[in-house]
Image (spheres, helix red, strand yellow):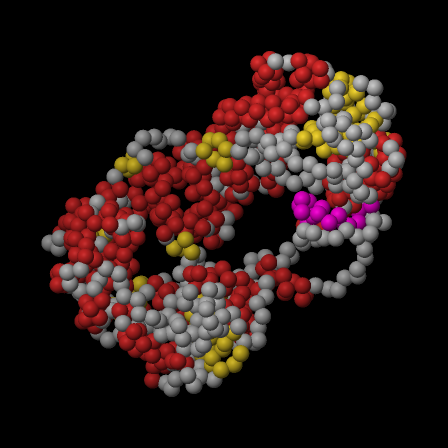
């Protein structure tokens, strides 16, 4: 091969993977020879070479008589769109549930026919509906190509009477018959591998319990060989690489580059392997950020999407900018609607940034500039005009800090620019498109385009295709060789009659040809390296029975796999020193200038001492998430606001009983109007949600006031009388009771509104909610009952602790008072409990000791390291 390159020949290969392998081999040969500079190896995949040569002869089309030379070659994207258009507009389109799938099958069928020399006229001899539909589609496709002045890729080879430049080609079973015959005729004999005449290597069969263990065994073997110090190059084949790409990458990284995942890992480490095939271009970070911008700039944007964009690293120039944006994001979560357009999001974010005195974060400036660039062009335009608009928007927005990109990010962005050029060249096919239509086409093209960044010359090459690598390696490993997968099963090409496929030698059309091809390929593998491993997994997801090795591997020495799948942290753990264990359950005592969080501090301390410390001292609050419409807390505020106005005007139960239904409805509607206005000052979900909330609130509060009508006579003594302070263990807790009622004999009742489902959760040594006990201690004078007013659509009722019967309903009973003789004794018991909780909070007690259900609604497991729910409480210390 090197002699052919030195002689000025272009070496062509049957697949892009072969071209990449040979290119790496040529580069390695120059490097190992001690050269610093060498000519770029001219190695091309045959299809790419044909397109390149056609583009060259187009430049000379004016002086040539060849009609095909003047036609523009279709790109893959154009060809895919043209096939979709042909199938969609054909009479057979209504017979398919998914015309796009039919178009994909038709395109593949036409390509196979061209590669094997199957004439379109042969389809008419097999008068099946599928064959006739395919023939019609091919004729329509060719007619559309002629109308557009284009030529399909599979028609290029027939237009070349001979190679326009000297060629060499490698011998491989991957060549299609038509291409092989053309190369034999015009380029002579193929380049053979030097080991072809040598005796075959006897392989070794490795069987693993599962796929994860199989990949772990492969990674362990590669790690040992690389660590041996001797030169090592391996070719690995994982036939289902597309589905297991991430899993394989994790297995190899865990063994080969685990240091890359440590916080103190070395800078610039390079993976010693390359995975062939690539991933969709749209998944690479620089491209994903660009496409996300286009998606965000039109239509309604959910908060989660806008929040992710705000925090995206592509828009931040420094760690300070990142921190400022994080603070803005936290505030947005309490003030933002669930969704709105991007301009509205930017206006809200800029206003809140001013409230926080942050200035305007750079991300908002970048997004404004990008939106302005996108808005510079409107209406329906050809893609050649949309492409520069997209580039301008990306460079003003997510690509603004491209100077600090990695090599992979630069390469992905350049590939996207090439995609723009490809789309812009197809104006005659795509026509004029609206902004949304053009962006949808771009997104589909980026998802369908595979991309792999160039990362140098790694010693390990991982392929996803069962092919002959042609080159010599130190070792080969082929996975997945169970009896069900090797040899591959027959998979005839859809739409083309099977008998026609077998007549023209389509390998996948019969089990016999697949078997012959598998035997040939296995013999080639045996001559490519002195070390050969075959492997398979006994079990896999969805398999009904255990797998066994392929019969083609009979006689191969077998050994079980002993490697366990390992995540990256196992390597870090193995390298970590042994630490001395020191249990420290106490933080520093509460300082004089530290503020409490009212009853929330006591509630958290009761659930778990560590939670109390984290919530009060560390301010470890969960991030809020804007809900569609009004959130649960906002609905609670609305109920509070309406009932405050109602009882502020009525003042007592007698006024409620005398109120006519129409007057009551009018009173409630006034209260709802005022409550909505108050809540929407902080966060307005929009007119649609306000309109929906009115009838819901009206019906709910009418039901609730019917519950209030059945109570013992009372007078409202106080409505949210202001914040009072309760002192416990030297700490002061601010309290604000919703309502204080006075009964006929002067006894008092405390009521707190709740819109959720409540129970008597104030009982026990560590109550789930000490709110009512704390309020009871603050308003202890002549107190005979405390209660939650449960105001919700499922069940409107009082959940109470009372020393009297009938306080909240004619047949309500006296409660247990937790064994106390009267309510004053109960208050004394509550004081003891709350004093102890407050004392623990004051001294900094922070033991991880949750109550049985505390972990279910905590969210601090990343701090306390308790992984799940239902952790039993330790003894209280």
In this view of the protein, which residue sits in the foreground, 643 or 10?
643
In the depicted structure, whether residue 203 falls above or below residue 500 = below
Decide if residue 196 is on the left or right side of residue 804: left
Residue 709 placement: quadrant: top right
- Please state, as top left, top right, bottom left or bottom right, where the N terminus lies in the image: bottom left
Foreground of the two, 510 or 478: 510
In the image, residue 718 sits, relative to residue 110, either above or below, namely above
Residue 826 in magenta stretch: no
Which residue is painted at 29% across and 59% down in the image? Answer: 48
**Residue 807 in picture, x, y percent from top left:** 76, 26
The magenta-colored residue range is: 844-861
The residue at 17%/56% (across/down) is: 132
Q: Position of residue 698 (x, y in %)?
A: 57, 22
The vertical placement of 607 against 652, above or below, is below
Magenta segment main secondary structure: loop
Which residue occupies 31% across, 30% down?
379
Residue that appears at 24% across and 43% down: 429
Could you say which is closer to the camera, residue 522 or residue 665? 665
- Return the residue nearer the eye: 744 or 341: 744
**Image spot of residue 229 (x, y percent):** 56, 75
The answer to whether residue 699 shows anywhere in this view is: yes
**Residue 771: horizontal and vertical position, in percent?**
76, 34
Does residue 532 appear to the left or right of 336 in the view shown?
A: left
611 left or right, relative to 127: right
Q: Is 845 one of the magenta-colored residues?
A: yes
Horizontally, residue 285 falls left or right of residue 822, namely left
């Amino acid at each position: 091969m090197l002699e052919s390159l030195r002689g000025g020949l272009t070496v062509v290969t049957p697949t892009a993977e072969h071209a990449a392998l040979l290119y790496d081999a040529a580069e390695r040969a120059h490097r190992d020879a001690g050269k610093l500079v060498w000519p770029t190896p001219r190695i091309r995949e045959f299809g790419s070479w044909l397109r390149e040569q056609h583009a060259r002869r187009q430049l000379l089309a004016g002086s040539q008589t060849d009609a095909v030379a003047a036609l523009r070659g279709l790109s893959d994207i154009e060809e895919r769109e043209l096939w979709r258009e042909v199938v969609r507009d054909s009479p057979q389109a209504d017979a398919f549930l998914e015309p796009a799938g039919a178009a994909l099958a038709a395109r593949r069928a036409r390509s196979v026919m061209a590669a094997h020399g199957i004439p379109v006229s042969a389809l008419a001899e097999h008068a099946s509906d599928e064959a006739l539909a395919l023939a019609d589609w091919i004729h329509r496709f060719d007619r559309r190509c002629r109308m557009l002045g284009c030529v399909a890729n599979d028609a290029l080879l027939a237009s070349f009477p001979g190679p326009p430049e000297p060629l060499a080609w490698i011998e491989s079973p991957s060549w299609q018959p038509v291409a092989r015959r053309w190369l034999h005729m015009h380029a002579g004999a193929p380049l053979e591998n030097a080991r072809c005449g040598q005796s075959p290597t006897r392989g070794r069969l490795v069987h693993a319990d599962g796929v994860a263990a199989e990949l772990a065994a492969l990674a362990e073997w590669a790690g040992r060989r690389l660590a041996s110090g001797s030169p090592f190059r391996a070719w690995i084949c994982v036939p289902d690489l597309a589905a297991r790409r991430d899993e394989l990458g994790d297995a190899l990284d865990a063994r080969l580059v685990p240091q890359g995942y440590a916080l103190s890992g070395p800078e610039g480490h390079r993976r010693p392997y390359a995975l062939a095939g690539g991933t969709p271009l749209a998944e690479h970070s620089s491209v994903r950020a660009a496409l996300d911008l286009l998606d965000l700039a039109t239509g309604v944007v959910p908060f989660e999407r806008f929040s992710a964009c705000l925090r995206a690293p592509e828009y931040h120039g420094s760690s300070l900018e990142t921190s400022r944006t994080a603070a803005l994001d936290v505030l947005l979560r309490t003030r933002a609607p669930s969704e709105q357009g991007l301009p509205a999001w930017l206006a809200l974010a800029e206003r809140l940034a001013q409230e926080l005195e942050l200035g305007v974060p750079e991300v908002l400036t970048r997004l404004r500039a990008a939106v302005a660039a996108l808005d510079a062009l409107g209406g329906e335009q050809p893609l050649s005009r949309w492409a520069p608009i997209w580039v301008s928007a990306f460079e003003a927005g997510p690509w603004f800090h491209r100077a600090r990109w990695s090599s992979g990010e630069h390469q992905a962005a350049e590939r996207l620019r090439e995609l723009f050029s490809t789309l812009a060249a197809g104006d005659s096919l795509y026509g004029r498109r609206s902004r949304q239509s053009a962006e949808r086409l771009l997104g589909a093209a980026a998802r369908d385009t595979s991309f792999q960044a160039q990362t140098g010359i790694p010693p390990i090459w991982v392929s996803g295709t069962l092919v002959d690598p042609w080159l010599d390696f130190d070792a080969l490993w082929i996975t997945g060789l169970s009896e069900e997968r090797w040899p591959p099963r027959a998979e005839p090409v859809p739409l083309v009659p099977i008998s026609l496929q077998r007549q023209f030698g389509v390998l996948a059309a019969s089990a016999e040809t697949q078997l012959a091809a598998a035997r040939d390929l296995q013999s080639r593998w045996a001559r490519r390296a002195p070390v050969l491993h075959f492997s398979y997994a006994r079990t896999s997801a969805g398999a009904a029975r255990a797998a066994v090795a392929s019969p083609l591997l009979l006689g191969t020495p077998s050994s079980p796999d002993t490697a366990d799948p390992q995540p990256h942290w196992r390597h870090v753990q193995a390298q970590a020193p042994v630490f001395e264990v020191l249990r420290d359950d106490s933080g520093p005592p509460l300082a004089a200038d530290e503020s409490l969080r009212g009853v929330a501090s006591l509630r958290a301390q009761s659930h778990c001492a560590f939670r109390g410390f984290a919530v009060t001292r560390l301010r470890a609050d969960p991030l809020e998430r804007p809900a569609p419409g009004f959130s649960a807390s906002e609905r609670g505020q609305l109920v509070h606001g309406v009932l405050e106005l109602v009882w502020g005007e009525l003042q007592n139960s007698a006024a409620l009983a005398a109120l006519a239904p129409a007057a009551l409805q009018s009173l409630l509607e006034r209260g709802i109007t005022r409550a909505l206005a108050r809540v929407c000052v902080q966060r307005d979900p929009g007119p649609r949600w306000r309109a929906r909330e009115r009838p819901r609130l009206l019906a709910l509060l009418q039901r609730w006031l019917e519950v209030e009508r059945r109570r013992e006579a009372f007078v409202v003594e106080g409505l949210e009388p202001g914040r009072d302070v309760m002192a416990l263990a030297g700490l002061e807790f601010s309290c604000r009771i919703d309502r204080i009622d006075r009964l006929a004999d002067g006894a008092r009742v405390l009521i707190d509104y709740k819109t959720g489902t409540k129970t008597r959760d104030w009982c026990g040594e560590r109550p789930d909610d000490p709110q009512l006990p704390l309020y009871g201690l603050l308003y202890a004078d002549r107190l005979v009952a405390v209660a939650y007013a449960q105001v919700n659509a499922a069940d409107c009722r009082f959940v109470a602790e009372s020393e009297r019967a009938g306080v909240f309903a004619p047949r309500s009973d006296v409660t247990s008072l937790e064994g106390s003789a009267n309510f004053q004794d109960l208050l004394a018991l509550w004081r003891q409990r709350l004093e102890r909780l407050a004392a623990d909070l004051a001294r900094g007690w922070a033991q991880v000791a949750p109550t049985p259900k505390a972990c279910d609604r905590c969210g601090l497991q990343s701090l306390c390291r308790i992984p799940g729910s239902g952790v039993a409480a330790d003894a209280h210390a």
